[in-house]
Structure formats: structure tokens, C-alpha cells
Image (cartoon, rainbow, N blue to C red):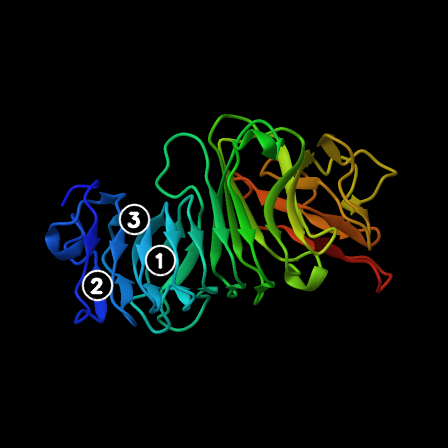
Amino acid sequence: MAGAQALTLPASVTALTIGNSNANGLAQFMSPTYTAALSGGTGMSLTKVGTNVQTLGALSYTGATNINAGTLVINGALSSTAAVTVGQVGGLGTTATLGGAGSIAGPVTVVGAGTGNTLGKLAPGANLTTGAAILTINNTISVGLGASMDYRLSQSTNQALANNDLVIGGGAVSFGGPISLNINAYAGTLASGSYLLMYSSGTINGGVSPTGWLISQTGDTGHAYSVSVPDSNHMYLTVVAANNSTWSGSTDGVWNTGVTNWSSGPVPGATAGTTSNDGAIFGGSVTNKIITVDGGRVIRDVTFTSSAGGGYTIGAGAVNSNSLILS
């Protein structure tokens, strides 16, 4: 069935499963990109299975929506106020993704880590090769520990240009713990500044900036990243220039500011209790691999190059408060 012909299912259909064929979606006759209206009877639910990408337009049914595998892109209005679940508890251990530029009336749950779980992913721009998407969820959003969010970001932080993925919520947004945030700098190197990732009329993460997120990127260079919730209703990705320094150990094995033990960049690490954009790089051709931290330091990350080999020990000095913390 082509994407321009509306489909109304009889009231006797109480559960619809799409994606079985992995190629053509519904019963092997719905095209992977189906933009016309899909309507079902009272109580009908929709379940996405299979590893394929299925794009849908306006959806009119009253039951739940379950994305158990693959990707469901919603580019119209999903009018059902029943639950939308992305991922599956005790599923096949793969990934399920919700994306699109449409609107969803019901609460959305993105399944997190658990034995055998199919992890959920929220990705407005899923399946796009150009541009970005704004996904509107007019209800609560719950993202589980270990789930993920993908964003396509441009070279401008100006959201008015609509060149960056965005999630708009209509209720409280909660995170069950650290998640993976994957950034696709689809237009090239990102701008330094703050990219709006999410806005909600409800409180995001209890009004507290999240910690421990695993942030990865493709297409960007020379930056460090952090996520903040500065005013309860907005969540931003802050992009700043990264400071990377390489350990030489040419003077001694002390990580401090008094001697020259770093062959490039400043001595990395802000004092404990503050954030840092510094990264420390350790290679193989160095004299001192047993390193003593002179005081509490906070750094962004530690990199051991392929030539680093073994033998590195990084520990506190004589004062117990000395420590190395990855921010």
C-alpha cells in the first residue's frame, strides 16, 4: 500500500503488529514510508516489531503503542492518550527507536537496562539524512537507566532556524540514571555554545542537571560536552573548546603545576569541586609512568593511546584528600 492512501481498519481488529517482514511493514503491503492516515477501532493497539524502519503519518486508535524493535518514525499526530513504550522489558536484547517530527498525546516510556531488555532510544531525527526534526510529546517522558537519546545538531545553536533536533514535552521528564547521549554533527563542526535539547512545560529531571551521562559524537572535533538543566524546563548541551594535554613525565612523576611534566597544553585538571574541560593523554614514550596526583583534581577524561602499553599507575599523594575525578 502506497503512502498516500488512508487506511481504516475494522472494529474487529484490536491489535495491529507492523514490521513482521522487516522490509515492507504491515502484512507486507504497507510501504516503509506510509504518510497517509491510519485509523483503528476503539481499544486497538499498535506494536512495531522487526529491525526495519517504519514511517507513519496520522494515527487514530485508542490503545497502547509498543515499539519492541527497529525504528518507528511518527510524522503525524498520534492521538491515543494510552502509553507509548519504546523498547521491551525482557525483549530480544536489541534496540528500539522512536523518532519523527510528529506529536504524541500519551506518556512515553523509554526502556532502560535490565537482563535481556530491548533498550529504548529517543531520536527525533531518526532515519534523516538531511536536516533535523522536532518531536512533540504532550505528556510525561520517562527515560530509563542505560537508555539513549540521539540528536542531529547543526553548526548553529539558534533553535529558531529549526536545524537541530528537539524534544518538546508536555509534562514531567524523568531520567532513571545515566544514559547515552549520541550527537551527530551532521553539518560539520559544532558551534561553541548551548544547544537546546529538550523543553517541557513540566519539570525536567527534578530541576537538577544530570550527571554521569555517556556523551559521544560523530562529525565534531575539538570540543568537550556537558548537559545542564538550568531552569527546570529546559535541557541544554553545552559545547566548549576542549583542552587536551599529553603527559611526558620528563621531570618527575608528580601531577602538579610546579614542573614541566606535560609536553602539550596546560596542566590538566581544575581543583576538586569544580568542573573541567581538560583531558589528559598518556602515551608510551615517557620516563615516569608512576604518577602521583598533587591535589584533588577534576578532569573531563583520560586517554591511553595505542602505544601506551602497561605500567601506568595514577594515585593520590600523601594527603588523603588528593584524588583524580572524572567529571
Nearest the camera: 324 or 288?
A: 324
Q: Is residue 5 visible?
A: yes
Q: Could you tell me the amino acid type at mark 1?
A: Thr
Q: Position of residue 172 (x, y in %)?
A: 61, 63
Q: Nearer the viewer, mark 3 or mark 2?
A: 3
- The CA distance from mark 1 to mark 3 is 19 Å
Q: Position of residue 276 (x, y in %)?
A: 75, 44
Ranked by sequence position, the earlier of labels 3 and 2 is 2
Nearest the camera: 115 or 151?
A: 151
Q: Is residue 242 visible?
A: no
Which secondary structure, mark 3? strand
Residue at the (41%, 69%) spot, across then down: 82
Query: How packed is label 1: few (under 14 Cα within 10 Å), some, or many (20 or more)?
Result: many
- The CA distance from mark 3 to mark 2 is 13 Å
Compared to 223, does 288 lie above or below?
Answer: below
Q: Can you tell which mark lies on residue 113?
A: none
Q: Position of residue 242 (x, y in %)?
A: 67, 34
Look at mark 2 in the image and give the residue it sits on: 17
Look at mark 3 in the image and give the residue it sits on: 56
Among all residues in the image, which is located at the extreme left? 28
Look at mark 1 in the image and give the residue it sits on: 95
Q: Position of residue 236 (x, y in %)?
A: 65, 45
